[in-house]
Image (tube, rainbow, N blue to C red):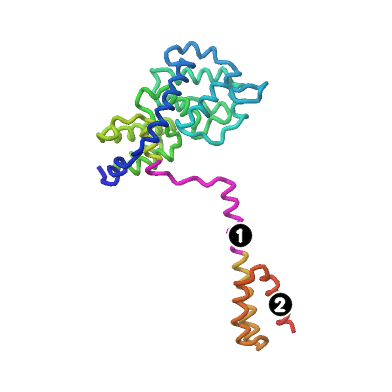
Amino acid sequence: MDTYMLEQIGAFDKDGTFKNQIDQTMVLLQEFRTKYPYVKKPDLIETLTADDVFNESAGNVGDFFHWIEFRLKEIGYLSHLYSELYRNIREHLEEFKDLLRNVVDKNKSLAEKVDAPWQEISGMGGDKHLAKKIIFCFNYDTNDILPIFKTSDLEYFLDKITTNPIPDNYPRLTLGEKYQFLTSELIKNKEKISQTKPWGPVYFSRFLYETFPPPRNITSLEKKKKREKEEQKRQQQQKYAEFIELLNELRKNNKISATERRAYPKEWDNQKNRREQLIEELKRKKSN
């Protein structure tokens, strides 16, 4: 085992802050499972109401998803959820109930649960973060799943803690098969280390995120701001090139002195709000 990895394990959560947070969250998860006892009593899925998904009269997320998104936020934060998504689920309540039956079916593999047709409800496709969290909440006690819902994060963590190569057929796997493979490999590595073997899936996942924070994806707004900043920089470079070209031409034609040639760039640097005026001033000198 890599020395750095062992050092990070030993140094993690010395004051027990994360453990206390997660212990409290696991109590909440038990409450959720008691309130929605679908694992032991799948027939009760039929009693889930449209208002449990989204309460139209109040305009609020329903109780079921209030648990998933907010009360259980320590088990994998979900971003970019919105009321329209819950309305979509409400409108496809029977399809969602079928998906829940699949989630609690002990004869279904983790891959099959992820690969179920969640995408038929608008907003639940893609990398299926929300679906994976629901699956985790009803299957965490199987000890073969982690609350890491981004495929790229799973790939990143596996690369950090093991040197084992990814199998050649990995790119051809379905999303669910990738999720099952990656979580299985991470759990195998956890089980090999005496210090991490007793850790639960939520605590181990927190260790990975705290120790090996994945590169953050840039949002579309940040990309736009970056493009605007780069464009401003390009325009400034063009203006400066024009400014220097004018200076050199004026000096060559003896329209400014050597002292002025040295002074103008300093003024350019010190008076950014006058740069346009400086260029216009030099253009007038050139035309005289």
Q: Is residue 168 visible?
A: no
Front residue (pair 96, 52): 52
Q: Is residue 225 magenta?
A: yes
* Disc 2 secondary structure class: helix
Q: Residue 259 sits in which quadrant?
A: bottom right
Image coordinates for residue 264, horizontal then vertical, percent? 63, 78
* Cα distance between the residues tagged 1 and 2: 25 Å
* Disc 1 secondary structure class: helix
Residue type at mark 2 is: Glu
Q: Is residue 46 magenta?
A: no
Image coordinates for residue 20, horizontal then vertical, percent? 39, 31
Residue type at mark 1 is: Glu
Give the magenta-colored segment's residue range. Answer: 210-234
Name the side, left or right, on which 30 lies relative to 192: right
247 versus 91 height, above or below = below
The N terminus sits in image quarter: top left
Which residue carries the number 2 mark? 281
Q: Residue at x 40, y 41 (%)?
A: 210
Image coordinates for residue 241, horizontal then vertical, percent? 60, 73
Residue positioned most to the front = 15
Q: Main secondary structure of the magenta part?
A: helix
245 versus 93 height, above or below = below
Q: Residue 205 sits in which quadrant?
A: top left
Which residue carries the number 1 mark? 231
The C terminus sits in image quarter: bottom right
Front residue (pair 245, 5): 5
280 versus 98 height, above or below = below
Going from N to C along the chain, the mark reached first, 1 or 2, is: 1
